[in-house]
Amino acid sequence: MEHAKTVLIIDDDADYVSGLAHLLETNGYGVRTAASGGDGLDLAKTVKPDAILLDVMMDDRTDGFFTLERIRAVPDLSDIPVIVISSIYSDYPVFRVSPESGWLPANLFLPKPVNPARLLAELARLTGTGHLTLPAETRSQPT
Amino acid sequence: MKIVKIPGKDLDLFASVLPAFGRLYAPVKRGSGYVFDQPANWSEIALSYARTILPPRKLLLPPREALFTFDPVNGYRDLLAEAAEPQVLFGVHAYDIHGLNILDRVFGQGKYADPYYITRRRNSAIVGIDFDPDDRHFARSMNADFVDGGFDLFLHDIGDDYLVRVGTSRGDDMVAMSGCLMSEPTAADIAEFKRRSGQRHAAYRTGVELGDLPEILEMEYHSEVWKELGERCLSCGSCSMVCPTCYCFDVSDEVELGTRAGSRLRTWDSCLFKTHAAVAGGENFRKSRSSRVKFRFYHKQRGYVAEYGRPSCVGCGRCSVACPAGIDIVTVIRTIRGQTDVHADDVNVATAGR
């Protein structure tokens, strides 16, 4: 029997993390959480998750970007899929460097608030768990 | 040179895209000093610092570097690819950039250009930043308080904003990538730059007269000052280790035990070490500490001038801070000039401004 994939959520918003963790766990993922970039990096080295969901604005508003660089610098972690989830573009419209321009070494950028269906589909793709169908109660309106 | 402006409050956003150009190194506080290291976050980066313990040359001419490996099966394999890993050095002071420009002349030109240094230099983006001089800085005397080349971007604090001088096409790419963070400076911005530049010039509390120093050193070759310094110098080599422009190195082969495989290593050396001038056969051309400490001063302020037209000292003050014997380069120069006693000021200067 295949073990559940583990997702590490690095985000300092406890309520948001709680909701996200519930979404993932009800869809068959194991979840670990960290409230800061430093703790997230340490936990990633220990747990070696199958995917990482990374917030940007934590103690500093660019914390997640720096954490991502440190994750990529660790050989054991460099291949772990990372989805950056952040409202930094809407909160700071002057920051218009497109995540698709190639500077961000994440596998994917999703704006907050994140579409749960999109998130689950992308996680399934990146972790190789195939296409998942959401239970009816978790389907949301498309953004 | 193209000049743009960025709000100080948006420097963190700008810094977050710099890793697109390489692994980011910046001055961060470690213990009681500052070092160039990979920052954990923006708050860790020190925009205002006196000096780092080791100069940024440690990232271009590493203290210990494997040049190539060898083994009986695969032969030789050079490690130039490792040297080509891109990196960004953020927050480098002007005198340290001058230091790199001086190393460029030594390693980057001529018959024996060093491919490892050249590769690292080409793949290192440099973002400079202003500094406020302390009691140890005499970069203004060494014409190293302002730099007009050898960097990709240079940030000048003008209050709420930074003027950004663009030094290379890679710097221009950085500006382009950061998009709407940068804007055109105004006449008021330029006026504020000039005002602060004048303030910084006036803030230097330490200086040396440079013009005829090489000739005075020639005249004072047999001065008793060198003997007195030799008695105080510990030959620890700290001055060389912390110097932005020292470039002596040793080469050795390290063989894995029980095999015929290994690597050729380059490691930092110092002309203060007793073995530095020792040659095969047992002769040592600088056996005494006084001869070695004299050599260091003459190389920096006389020999390099003859070879390249300027001293290789950039006035950062690191050697004075690092010396456990309290030898202060400014005091030594003034003493040679007959302006002070080599003992009188050293203790006071050694304890001030650390």
Image (cartoon, rainbow, N blue to C red):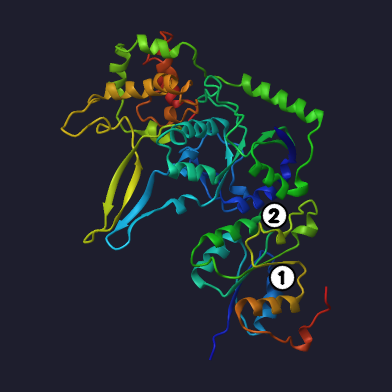
Whole-percent x and y of residue B112? 40, 36
User: Which amino acid lies under the numbered mark 2 shown in the image of this protein?
Assistant: Arg
Residue A61 badge:
2
Q: Quadrant of the N terminus of chain B?
A: top right
Residue farthest along the front direction in this orientation: B111
Q: Nearer the viewer, residue A129 or B110?
A: B110
Earlier in the chain: of badge 2 and badge 1, it is 1
SS for dot 2: loop
Q: Is residue B220 above or below residue B288?
A: above
Q: Residue at x 70, y 79 (%)?
A: A121
Whole-percent x and y of residue B210? 49, 15
Q: Is residue A37 above or below residue B190?
A: below
Q: Residues within 10 Å of mark 2 (few under 14, many from 20)?
A: some
User: Which amino acid lies under the numbered mark 1 shown in the image of this protein?
Assistant: Asp
Dot 1 corresponds to which residue? A15
Q: Is residue A18 above or below residue B109?
A: below
Q: Nearer the viewer, residue A88 or A123?
A: A123
Q: Nearer the viewer, residue B72 or B149?
A: B72
